[in-house]
Amino acid sequence: EVQLLESGGGLIHPWESLRLSCAASGFTFSTYAMSWVRQAPTKGLEWVSTITSGGTSYYTDSVKGRFTISRDNSKSTLYLQMDSLTADDTAVYYCANNFQYGSSWSGYFDSWGQGTLVTVSS
Amino acid sequence: EIGLTQSPATLSLSPGERVTLSCRASQSVSSSLAWYQQKPGQAPRLLIHNVSNRATGIPVRFSGSGSGTDFTLTISSLAPEDFAVYYCQQRSAWPYTFGQGTKLEIK
C-alpha cells in the first residue's frame, strides 16, 4: 500500500523559511516523479512543483526562485524548501506521486499524503 | 497558463440521480485531462486520467469524456459517498492547472 506522510508544517512569520518533508513507502520511490500540490484555506488546488526520477524540477511561477524541490532516494523522502514565505503561501501542502504509464511519468497525481498545514502570519 | 472553468459551482442532487459535471479549457489540452474527488478533511483522489480512463479501484459509475477544450465527468447513479468536490486538471502545458471545483451536495 502506498503511503505518503508529510511533515514540517506550522506557523511561520513572513519572509522566513520552512522545509517540508514527505516520507514515502509502498512503492519504488526512486522510479517515480513526485509533486507538491497546495490548497489555501477554503480554496481549490494549486500545483506547486514536480521533480522527475532523474532530478529535473518544475515550478509554478509564483514560487520560482523561492521554493526548491528535492529528493533523497536513499531515504525515500521528498522535500520542499520554502524561502521568503508570504501570506499567499498559507495552505495545506500535499505531496503526491505522479501517475505512471508503464515506466513513463505523467502530470497526473496518483496517491496523495494527508497534507501538512503551513500558516504564514505575523 | 491554461485556465479550466468548471460548471456549475454547486449541484444539489439526490442519491440515485445521474449527474454530469463540465470542465472547459481556455485552449486545447488534447486528451490530457484528469478528474479528482475531494471529501471534507481529506486529500484529493484521482478518479479519471487522460479524459476517460478510470484510476485503480474507481467504480464503473464514474466515466469521463471529451477532447480539446470541453470535458465532462458523469456519475451514472449517485451513491451517498459521492457527495464531494470534484476538480478537473490539465497536464498539457506548464504550469499544470486545476479547475475551481464543482461541489456535489445532497438535496
Image (cartoon, rainbow, N blue to C red):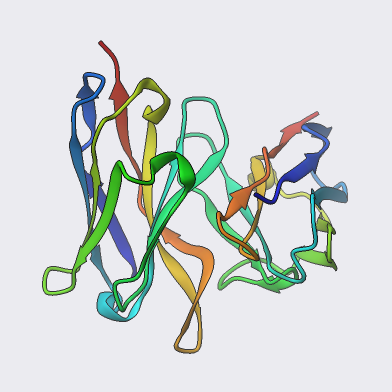
Q: A22 or A62, which is in the foreground?
A: A62
- In this rendering, is residue B76 above or below A29? above
Q: B78 or A8, which is in the foreground?
A: A8
Query: Looking at the rendering, in which quadrant would you find the C terminus of chain B?
Result: top right
B34 with respect to B69 (left or right):
left
Q: Residue at x 11, y 74 (%)?
A: A74
Image coords of residue B101 (percent x, y): 68, 39
Farthest residue in the bottom direction?
A102
B35 with respect to A110 (left or right):
right
- In this rendering, is residue A38 above or below A100? above
| Residue B15 sits in quarter | top right
Q: Residue at x 72, y 49 (%)?
A: B79
Farthest residue in the left direction?
A74
| Residue B90 sits in quarter | bottom right
Q: B105 or B52, which is in the foreground?
A: B52
Farthest residue in the top direction?
A122
Q: Residue at x 52, y 34 (%)?
A: B40
Q: A120 or B38, which is in the foreground?
A: A120
How many numbered circles are shown?
Answer: 0
Image coords of residue A116 (percent x, y): 30, 39
Q: Residue at x 71, y 46 (%)?
A: B3
Image coords of residue A7 (percent x, y): 21, 44
- In this rendering, is residue A14 above or below B45? above
Image coords of residue A30 (percent x, y): 26, 78
- In this rendering, is residue A66 above or below A111? above
| Residue A75 sits in quarter | bottom left
B98 with respect to B25 (left or right):
left
